Image (tube, coloured by chain):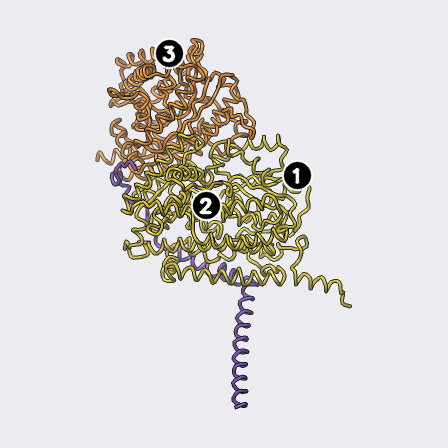
C-alpha cells in the first residue's frame, strides 16, 4: 500500500528541497575528507540554479579569466612552479560549496556572486604575478615586471590609484597565502613549517609565519621592481618585513599604519608618509603622480562604499539581507583592501537587484534564524565558513562582522588636501588595526555595532596567537558578564588548522548552545562529524 | 519538391535531435559530475596528491644562502 | 676581584620597583613617572620636579590575575608588570608615559589608563588619584619626517601633559638641565662599562647589569653619588690573577631586566661584555648631544630614533644596518661570540633572533647562541646546558683558529 502522504512529502522535498530542520546535511559528507557523497539537493529550482549559474558558470568563468589575463601557458607555468596555486585553486568550487551549504533562493544567489568576484580578482592577480615573474620566465625581467609594484597585503590598494593603468600593484601575500587558506587550508601548512624550520618559534602570529614561509620556501614569484610594506597588523608583521626584505631584495618603502590614529598629529604625519610613498613610486618607476586618476578611482570606490552602507541598512533593519556571514566577511575585506576594480561594480549591481527583490517582496532570507550574531575580532581563515555551519546547525545567523565594518567611510575628492586627509584615515583603519589593535576605545565598539545591527549574540573570535586580542581577553569577559551578553569564544589559529581543528571550533559552539543556551540543534547530523582532512 | 522539403525537414529534425541528444548527454554527464562531487573527488584523490608530490620533490633554492647585503640600499628620506 | 662597595645596596634596590631611592624621591615631593620602552625618552621624565622609573616586576613568578586579563599567550614581562600593578606594586606612580611600541606592553598600559568610556569599565588599577596615562606615537623610521613627528608627539603627550597635571617646568632651560644630569649618568655608566673592554675586565657583566638597571629605575640625582663612587672604585680595582671566564660574549635581544640571567650566562664561563637589549646600556647610555642653537626637544627626538637598534624600525637601510652594528659591537668589546635571547612571545625578537642567528654567523663569522627565555628564568638547567655547550663550541673554534 502506497502511503500517499509519504509520496506527497517526497515529491515536495524533491521539488522544494527538504525544509531546514528536516535536513541532515552531515549525512551527505564523506568521513574525514569533507567531500560530498553527493552534493546537496536544494529542490529543483535551486539545484538547477546552483548547477548552471554557480557550478558550470564559475568553472567556465575561471577558464575565461585565465584566457583574458595572460593565457593558459602562463597559468600552466605558474601552476607547475608554485604550490600555492596548484594545490589551492583547483578545488575552488568546493570553497563555494562549503560557504553556500544549505542556502536557498536569493541568499544562495547573492552570496555566490560575492564568491565569483573574489575568484575573478584572485585569478587576475596571480596571472599578473606569473606574467611578470622572472623565475618562470627564465630569469628575464620583462616590461610588465617593470610596471608592477609588490605590496604587503594589508597596504590598501588605493594608495596606488594615481598610477592606475600604468602601474599595477599586486599584494605579495593576498593570493599565495590569504586566499589559499580559505580555499585549501592544506597548502599554508608547508609555509608555516618552512619558517619554523629555520628557527622561528611557533608562537608568533601564524599569518606572519606563513607570509615569511612563502619566501623561505622560495615560493614567491619575482614579479615586481620594488615593494611597499607596512607594520600591519602587529609586531610580527613588522618583523616579517625584515625576512621579506632579505629574500625579496628589492627597493623597499615602509608605510606604517599608526595605532594612535585618533590623534590629529598622527594623522598629519600619516598624510606626509603617504606623500613620501608616492615620491618613492615616482622615483622607482619614473611615472608621475596623476591627481585626476586618483580622483576618478576614489569616486568609483566611494560608490562601492555607498552600496555597502545600503547593504548594512538592510542587514540591520530587516530579515531580507541576502548575504550570508562568510560571503559578507570575505567579499568586504577583499574589496576594501584591494581597492576599486570593475568586477566589484558588476557584482554589486547583481547583488543590488537581488537585495531589492528581497526587500520589495519581504523575503525572509534566513528563515530559521534563532539568533542574530555579530562576529568580532579576526576570523579563522581555514574555517571562515563556520558561520554557514552555525546557521545550518543552530540557526545562528552571523549578520555582520568586525572586518566588514572597518572601512566605514567615503573619501572626499573636492580638493587634494581633503582626499589626502581621508586617505590617511582609510589607510590607518587597516584590517585588524581599526578595531582589533587600534586601541581599546575601538575594540569595544562592539556594543555599538551590536545594537546597530540588532544582534543578540556575539561570536568572539579567539585567535590564540594574536597578542593584541589576547591582551584584552579578560576585559571582554568582564564586559560580557556586566552587560549580560550571550557570547561564545571561538578559538582558532588563523591559518593553522592543526592548532585548533574545525571540529574543536564546532564543539566550542555546540557546548555553548547546549549548556548555556539550552537549545536543540536544527540539524543534529552537523553536531559531530569528522572533516579533519578537508580542504 | 515536397519530398525534398520533407527530407530536409527530417534532416533538420534529426540534426536537432542529435544536437539535443548531445547536449542532453553532456548536461547529464556534467550534472552527474556535479551532483556526485566527482570533480571534488578527482581533485582530492588524484590531482592534489600528484601535484603535492611534484611540489614536495621540487628542488628549491636555499634562500638562507642569499646575501643580506647591508650596504645595497641607501638611506632614503622616502 | 674585590667586591664593589655598593653592590649589595644596588641589588637591594632592584628587589622592588618602589625601592628605597624611589621612596626618597617621592618624599622629596617629586613625581614618579613610569615607562616601559626605550622609545619613551627617560630624560624628559627626569625634568626638575619628577623622575623616571623604568618598570620592572622582579620576583614575579606566577602572574595569575594578569593571565586572566592578558591570557597566557602574551609575553611574561607584560603579564608580570600587570600582576605587579594589580598587587599594588606601582601605586607610587604618578603617571605612566606609554608607548604602543610593542603590543603586549601596550595592552598592559591600556589597562592602566582611565579611559572614561561608556564601552568599557576602567579598572582603577593604580590607587593614586593623580595617576594618569598618556600615549605617544613612536615612528617606525628615522627620517626627517619622523624626527619632526616624534618631537611633536613628545611635546603634546609628554611635556604638555606633565605641565598640565603636575605643573612641571618644560622650558628649554629645564630640558637642558635634565639632559645635563642624564649625560652625567651616561658618562659614568659608560666609564664603568668600558672596563668590560679590557682584556681581563675588572667588572663582570652581572655587576654592570645591576648598576645599569639601578640607573634606569631610581631617581637620577639620588643614584648619581653611588655611581660616582663606584666609578671611582673601579679605577683601582684589580682583576683576578686567573681569568674567571672562558670566553666573552655580547648579549643582545629583547626585554631583559633580570641580572640573574646575566649571572647564569657568566656561571657557564661566558663573560657578558656588552648588553645590547632593552634595558641595556648600549643605546640608553649614549649621551645626548645638543648642537649650538638646536631646539633641545628636537635633539632628544632625533637622539632616541637615531640610537635605537630596535627591530621595530622599518627603513630598509636600518633593517640591514642593524647587523653591521651588532658585528661592530662584538669587535669593539672583543667578544668571541654572541648570545641572542628573546623573550617567549616577543614577536619582534623571534624574527630578529632567527635572522641574527643566520647572518651574524655566516656573514661576520661570529658564533651565535640563540635562546628563547622567560621573563623570570626558573628553568635555568636547560639554559645552563645551552650556554655551556656554546662556550665549548667557542673554545673549540678558538683552538682551531690558533692551529
- Furthest residue toward front: A414
The local crowd at label 2, few if under 14, some if 14 to 19, many if 20 or more residues have their Cα within 10 Å, is some
Q: Callout 1: helix, strand or loop?
A: helix
Same-chain check, marks 3 and 1: no
Q: Marks 2/3: CA distance?
A: 60 Å
Left or right, residue C77 beside residue A53: left
Question: In the drawing, does residue C168 fall left or right of residue B27?
Answer: left
**Does residue A5 appear to the left or right of A83 in the view shown?**
right
Q: Residue furthest left?
A: C403
Query: Of the residues under marks 1 and 2, which one precedes in the sequence?
Result: 2
Q: Which residue is mark 2?
A: A302
* Label total for image: 3
Q: Toward the viewer: A197 or A460?
A: A460
Q: Colour of chain A?
A: yellow
x and y, in percent, of residue A1 in the image: 78, 68
Q: Nearer the viewer, residue A382 or A337?
A: A337
- Closest to the observer: A62 or A510? A62
Query: Disc 3 and disc 1: Cα gap in Å?
Result: 58 Å
Q: Is residue C166 above or below residue A175?
A: above
Residue with the mark numbered 3: C222
Q: Is residue A55 above or below residue C59?
A: below
Mark 1 and mark 2: Cα distance apart in space: 43 Å
Image chain in purple: B
Visual hue assigned to chain C: orange
Q: Which mark is residue A367?
A: none
- The quadrant of the picture occupied by the N terminus of chain C is top left
Residue A40 in percent (x, y) is at 60, 59
Q: Mark 2 falls on what kind of element?
A: helix
**The C terminus of chain C is located in which quarter?**
top left
State the residue at coordinates (34%, 56%): A131
Location of mark 1 (residue): A516
Return the chain for callout 1.
A
Amino acid at each position: 500500500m502506497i502511503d500517499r502522504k509519504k509520496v506527497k512529502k517526497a515529491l515536495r522535498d524533491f521539488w522544494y528541497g527538504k525544509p531546514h530542520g528536516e535536513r541532515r546535511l552531515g549525512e551527505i559528507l564523506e568521513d574525514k575528507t569533507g567531500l560530498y557523497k553527493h552534493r546537496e539537493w536544494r529542490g529543483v529550482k535551486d539545484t538547477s540554479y546552483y548547477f548552471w549559474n554557480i557550478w558550470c558558470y564559475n568553472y567556465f568563468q575561471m577558464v575565461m579569466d585565465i584566457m583574458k589575463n595572460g593565457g593558459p601557458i602562463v597559468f600552466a607555468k605558474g601552476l607547475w612552479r608554485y604550490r600555492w596555486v596548484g594545490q589551492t585553486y583547483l578545488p575552488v568550487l568546493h570553497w563555494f560549496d562549503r560557504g553556500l551549504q544549505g542556502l536557498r533562493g536569493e541568499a544562495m544567489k547573492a552570496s555566490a556572486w560575492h564568491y565569483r568576484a573574489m575568484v575573478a580578482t584572485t585569478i587576475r592577480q596571480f596571472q599578473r604575478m606569473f606574467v611578470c615573474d622572472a623565475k618562470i620566465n627564465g630569469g628575464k625581467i620583462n616590461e610588465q615586471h617593470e610596471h608592477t609594484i609588490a605590496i604587503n597585503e594589508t597596504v590598501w590598494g588605493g594608495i596606488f590609484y594615481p598610477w592606475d593603468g600604468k602601474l599595477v600593484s599586486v599584494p605579495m601575500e593576498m593570493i599565495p597565502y590569504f586566499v589559499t587558506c580559505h580555499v585549501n587550508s592544506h597548502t599554508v601548512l608547508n609555509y608555516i613549517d618552512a619558517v619554523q624550520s629555520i628557527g622561528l618559534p611557533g608562537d608568533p602570529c601564524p599569518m606572519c609565519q606563513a607570509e615569511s614561509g612563502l619566501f623561505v620556501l622560495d615560493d614567491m614569484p619575482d614579479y615586481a621592481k620594488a615593494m611597499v610594506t607596512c607594520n600591519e597588523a602587529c609586531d610580527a608583521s613588522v618583523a616579517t618585513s625584515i625576512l621579506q626584505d632579505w629574500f625579496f631584495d628589492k627597493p623597499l618603502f615602509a608605510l606604517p599604519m599608526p595605532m594612535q590614529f585618533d590623534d590629529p598629529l598622527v594623522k598629519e604625519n600619516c598624510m606626509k608618509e603617504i606623500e613620501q610613498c608616492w615620491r618613492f613610486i615616482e622615483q622607482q618607476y619614473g611615472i608621475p603622480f596623476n591627481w585626476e586618476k586618483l580622483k576618478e578611482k576614489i569616486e568609483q570606490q566611494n560608490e562601492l562604499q555607498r552600496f555597502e552602507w545600503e547593504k548594512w541598512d538592510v542587514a540591520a533593519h530587516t530579515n531580507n539581507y541576502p548575504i550570508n556571514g562568510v560571503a559578507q566577511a570575505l567579499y568586504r575585506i577583499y574589496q576594501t583592501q584591494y581597492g576599486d576594480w570593475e568586477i566589484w561594480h558588476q557584482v554589486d549591481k547583481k547583488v543590488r537587484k537581488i537585495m531589492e527583490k528581497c526587500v520589495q517582496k519581504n523575503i525572509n532570507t534566513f528563515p530559521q534564524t534563532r539568533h542574530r550574531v555579530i562576529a568580532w575580532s579576526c576570523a579563522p581563515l581555514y574555517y571562515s565558513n563556520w558561520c554557514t555551519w552555525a546557521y545550518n546547525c543552530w540557526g545562528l545567523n552571523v549578520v555582520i562582522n568586525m572586518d566588514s565594518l572597518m572601512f566605514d567611510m567615503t573619501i572626499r575628492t573636492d580638493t587634494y588636501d581633503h582626499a589626502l586627509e581621508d586617505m590617511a584615515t582609510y589607510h590607518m583603519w587597516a584590517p585588524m588595526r581599526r578595531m582589533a589593535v587600534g586601541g581599546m576605545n575601538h575594540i569595544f565598539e562592539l556594543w555599538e555595532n551590536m545594537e546597530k545591527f540588532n544582534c543578540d549574540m556575539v561570536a568572539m573570535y579567539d585567535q590564540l596567537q594574536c597578542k593584541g586580542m589576547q591582551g584584552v581577553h579578560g576585559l571582554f569577559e568582564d564586559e560580557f558578564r556586566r552587560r549580560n551578553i550571550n557570547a561564545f569564544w571561538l578559538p582558532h589559529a588563523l591559518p593553522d588548522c592543526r592548532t585548533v581543528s574545525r571540529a574543536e571550533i564546532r564543539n566550542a559552539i555546540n557546548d555553548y548552545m547546549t549548556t548555556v543556551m539550552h537549545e536543540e540543534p536544527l540539524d543534529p547530523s552537523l553536531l559531530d562529524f569528522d572533516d579533519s582532512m578537508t580542504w | 519538391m515536397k519530398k525534398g522539403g520533407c527530407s530536409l525537414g527530417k534532416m533538420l529534425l534529426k540534426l536537432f535531435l542529435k544536437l539535443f541528444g548531445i547536449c542532453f548527454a553532456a548536461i547529464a554527464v556534467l550534472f552527474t559530475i556535479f551532483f556526485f562531487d566527482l570533480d571534488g573527488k578527482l581533485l582530492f584523490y588524484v590531482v592534489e596528491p600528484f601535484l603535492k608530490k611534484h611540489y614536495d620533490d621540487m628542488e628549491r633554492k636555499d634562500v638562507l644562502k642569499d646575501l643580506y647585503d647591508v650596504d645595497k640600499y641607501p638611506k632614503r628620506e622616502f | 676581584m674585590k667586591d664593589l662597595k655598593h653592590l649589595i645596596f644596588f641589588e637591594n634596590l632592584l628587589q622592588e620597583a618602589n625601592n628605597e631611592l624611589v621612596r626618597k624621591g617621592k618624599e622629596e615631593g617629586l613625581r614618579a613617572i613610569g615607562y616601559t620602552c626605550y622609545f619613551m625618552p627617560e630624560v624628559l621624565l627626569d625634568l626638575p620636579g619628577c623622575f623616571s622609573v623604568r618598570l620592572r616586576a622582579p620576583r614575579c613568578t606566577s602572574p595569575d590575575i594578569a593571565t586572566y586579563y592578558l591570557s597566557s599567550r602574551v609575553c611574561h614581562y607584560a603579564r608580570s608588570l600587570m600582576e605587579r600593578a594589580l598587587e599594588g606594586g606601582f601605586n607610587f606612580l604618578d603617571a605612566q608615559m606609554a608607548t604602543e611600541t610593542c603590543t603586549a606592553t601596550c595592552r598592559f598600559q591600556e589597562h592602566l589608563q582611565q579611559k572614561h568610556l561608556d564601552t568599557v569599565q576602567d579598572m582603577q588599577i593604580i590607587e593614586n588619584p593623580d595617576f594618569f596615562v598618556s600615549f605617544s606615537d613612536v615612528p617606525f623610521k628615522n627620517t626627517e619626517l619622523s624626527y619632526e613627528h616624534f618631537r611633536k608627539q613628545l611635546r603634546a603627550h609628554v611635556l604638555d601633559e606633565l605641565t598640565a597635571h603636575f605643573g612641571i617646568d618644560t622650558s628649554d632651560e629645564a630640558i637642558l638641565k635634565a639632559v645635563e644630569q642624564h649625560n652625567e649618568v651616561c658618562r659614568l655608566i659608560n666609564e664603568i662599562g668600558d672596563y668590560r673592554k679590557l682584556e681581563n675586565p675588572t667588572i663582570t657583566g652581572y655587576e654592570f647589569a645591576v648598576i645599569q638597571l639601578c640607573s634606569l629605575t631610581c631617581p637620577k640625582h639620588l643614584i648619581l653619588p653611588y655611581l660616582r663612587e663606584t666609578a671611582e672604585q673601579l679605577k683601582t680595582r684589580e682583576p683576578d690573577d686567573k681569568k674567571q671566564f672562558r670566553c666573552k660574549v655580547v648579549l643582545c635581544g629583547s626585554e631583559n631586566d633580570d641580572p640573574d640571567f646575566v649571572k647564569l650566562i657568566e656561571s657557564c664561563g661566558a663573560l657578558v661584555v656588552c648588553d645590547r637589549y632593552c634595558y641595556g646600556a648600549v643605546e640608553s647610555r649614549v649621551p645626548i648631544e645638543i648642537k649650538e642653537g638646536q631646539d633641545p626637544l628636537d635633539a632628544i627626538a632625533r637622539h632616541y630614533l637615531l640610537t635605537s637598534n630596535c627591530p621595530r624600525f622599518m627603513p630598509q637601510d636600518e633593517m640591514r644596518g642593524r647587523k653591521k652594528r651588532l658585528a661592530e659591537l662584538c669587535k669593539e668589546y672583543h667578544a668571541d661570540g654572541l648570545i641572542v635571547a628573546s623573550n617567549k612571545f616577543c614577536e619582534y625578537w623571534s624574527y630578529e633572533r632567527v635572522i641574527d642567528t643566520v647572518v651574524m654567523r655566516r656573514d661576520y663569522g661570529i658564533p651565535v647562541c640563540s635562546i628563547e627565555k622567560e621573563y623570570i628564568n626558573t628553568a635555568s638547567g636547560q639554559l645552563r646546558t645551552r650556554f655551556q655547550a656554546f662556550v665549548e663550541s667557542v673554545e673549540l673554534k678558538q683552538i682551531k683558529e690558533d692551529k
